[in-house]
Amino acid sequence: MKTSLLAFALGAMLAAVSVAANAGTLQENYTYVPPGGYVATKEMAIAIALIVATPVYGKKLLDGEKPFTAVLKDGVWIVTGYLPSNMKGGTLEVHISKQTGQIVRMLHWK
């Protein structure tokens, strides 16, 4: 009885790992990484950029830079604000790792 229960538990664990491995990556430290990375879409990248930038630069300044764009380059999302061609100044720029979600760089051009 104990042997069949142990075999069942082991089979269930292997099946769970197999399902997780097909959906994403189960790393050595048992951290699940989604197949597209933690920041899979440009919409997610823009949302994260605004979450981290708003306390630093303020909602009023960032609202003036809408719409924001996100471009994926070498596995890093580069999120930038919009500046009309007839205006002087700069915009927000946030670099976010697609795979890990790490904020690689954040600045506001002048």
Image: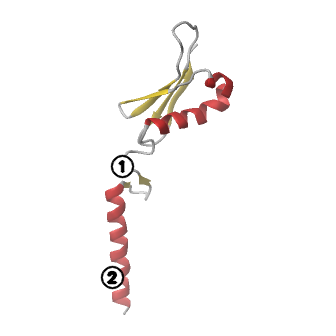
What kind of residue is marked 2?
A: Ala
Q: Is residue 31 above or below residue 86?
A: below
Q: Is residue 100 left or right of residue 64?
A: left
Point out the tag, 1 or 2, that comes first from the N-terminus.
2
- Residue pointed to by mark 1: 35
Percent across and percent down for residue 50 are 58, 33
Quarter of the image with the N terminus is bottom left
Quarter of the image with the C terminus is top right
Q: Is residue 11 left or right of residue 29?
A: left
Separation of marks 1 and 2 at Cα, in angstroms: 30 Å
How many numbered marks does the figure carry?
2
Q: Measuring 60% from the left and 30% from the top, which residue is drawn there?
A: 53
Q: Secondary structure at mark 2?
A: helix
Q: Measuring 57% from the left and 8% from the top, which residue is drawn there?
A: 87
State which mark lies toward you, 1 or 2: 1
Percent across and percent down for residue 102 are 49, 38
Percent across and percent down for residue 47 are 54, 37
Which of the pair 84/59 is nearer the observer? Answer: 84
Q: Is residue 44 above or below residue 95?
A: below
- Residue pointed to by mark 2: 7
Determine the image quadrant of residue 78: top left
Which of the pair 60/92 is nearer the observer? Answer: 60
Q: Measuring 67% from the left and 32% from the top, which residue is drawn there?
A: 55
